[in-house]
Image (spheres, helix red, strand yellow):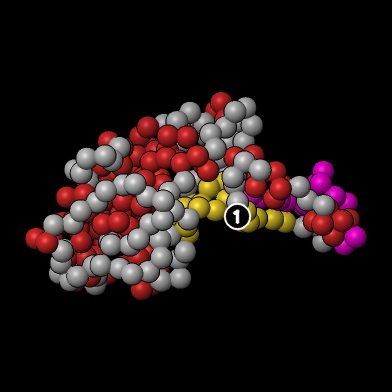
């Protein structure tokens, strides 16, 4: 662990967007990832929002990136006002279609760059995984649901954090963590745990600011 977390820079946000693009594509096109229903942007961000500069912009770009890819795949995305048109000339070559989408208007420059950088990675992984036909020589139109964009909830941070609910396009869900094993929440016994769980206010607090549905992606009990 380090007290000098250096993730929160334009360079690393861009790297994260590129890999998010790769995982979004394979979640829809590779049967190995067929059970994936959500992708989380950042796990365990620093809880002090003053130490995560640019995180709100990354949240917006992360959502836009996923939805642009899904619209390129022909997936219907509720509440989307993004316009993506796939030319018939690339309707049987997804990587070519994605490259064309990367230069479309109305998409942030960060998302455009990430899509463009993701294409050679997709081709390389496709060649190594036997997915060249899927990515470059077959119809890629999909009819499944869009992925859930997942974020740590806004109340995970303090000092005026950005609210990921403000940038939602399509389905979105929120993550929180609770570690009774760290102490300070409830005594380490069954009765105290149940009393705490039944009176937990995080779900209501998050719902009040649009962070719903909420799940607890990490938790721990002392036994």
Q: Where is residue 182 in the image (x, y as percent from the top left)?
A: 76, 47
Specify the quadrant that holds the N terminus: top right
The answer to whether 99 is drawn above or below residue 45 in the figure is below
Name the residue rendered at 35%, 65% in the picture. 28
Image x and y of residue 145, in percent: 41, 65
The magenta stretch is 175-191
Regarding residue 203, the answer to whether it shows in the image is yes
Q: What is the count of numbered marks?
A: 1
Closer to the camera, 77 or 135?
Answer: 77
Above-or-below relation of 62 to 193: above
Residue at screen point 39% across, 38% down:
13
Give the image location of residue 119, x and y in percent: 22, 53
Quarter-of-image position of residue 143? bottom left
Circle 1 Cα neighbour tier, 10 Å, few/some/many (<14 / 14–19 / ≥20): some
Q: Is residue 177 magenta?
A: yes
Residue 221 vs residue 118: left or right?
right
Q: Residue at x 41, y 51 (%)?
A: 79
Question: Relative to residue 58, is residue 157 drawn left or right?
Answer: right
Asked if residue 130 is among those painted magenta in the image, a careful observer would answer no
Who is closer to the viewer here, 80 or 72?
A: 80
Residue 16 shows in the view: no
The residue carrying mark 1 is: 213
In this rendering, is residue 117 above or below 190? above
Q: Residue at x 56, y 26 (%)?
A: 50
Asked which secondary structure carries label 1, the reply is loop
């Amino acid at each position: 662990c380090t007290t000098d977390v250096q993730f929160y820079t334009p360079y690393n946000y861009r790297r994260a967007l590129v890999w998010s693009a790769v995982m979004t594509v394979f979640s829809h096109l590779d049967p190995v990832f067929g059970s994936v229903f959500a992708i989380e942007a950042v796990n365990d961000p620093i809880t002090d929002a003053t130490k995560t500069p640019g995180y709100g912009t990354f949240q917006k770009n992360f959502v836009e990136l996923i939805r642009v890819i899904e619209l390129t795949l022909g997936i219907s995305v509720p509440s989307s006002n993004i316009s993506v048109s796939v030319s018939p000339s690339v309707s049987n070559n997804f990587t070519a279609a994605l490259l064309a989408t990367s230069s479309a208007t109305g998409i942030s420059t960060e998302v455009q760059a990430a899509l463009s950088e993701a294409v050679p990675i997709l081709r390389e992984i496709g060649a190594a995984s036997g997915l060249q036909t899927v990515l470059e020589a077959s119809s890629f139109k999909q009819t499944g649901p869009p992925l859930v964009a997942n974020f740590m909830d806004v109340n995970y941070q303090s000092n005026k954090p950005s609210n990921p609910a403000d940038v939602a396009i399509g389905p979105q869900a929120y993550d929180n963590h609770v570690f009774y094993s760290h102490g300070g929440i409830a005594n380490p016994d069954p009765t105290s745990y149940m009393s705490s769980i039944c009176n937990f206010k995080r779900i209501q607090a998050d719902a009040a600011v649009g962070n719903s549905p909420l799940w607890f992606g990490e938790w721990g009990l002392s036994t």
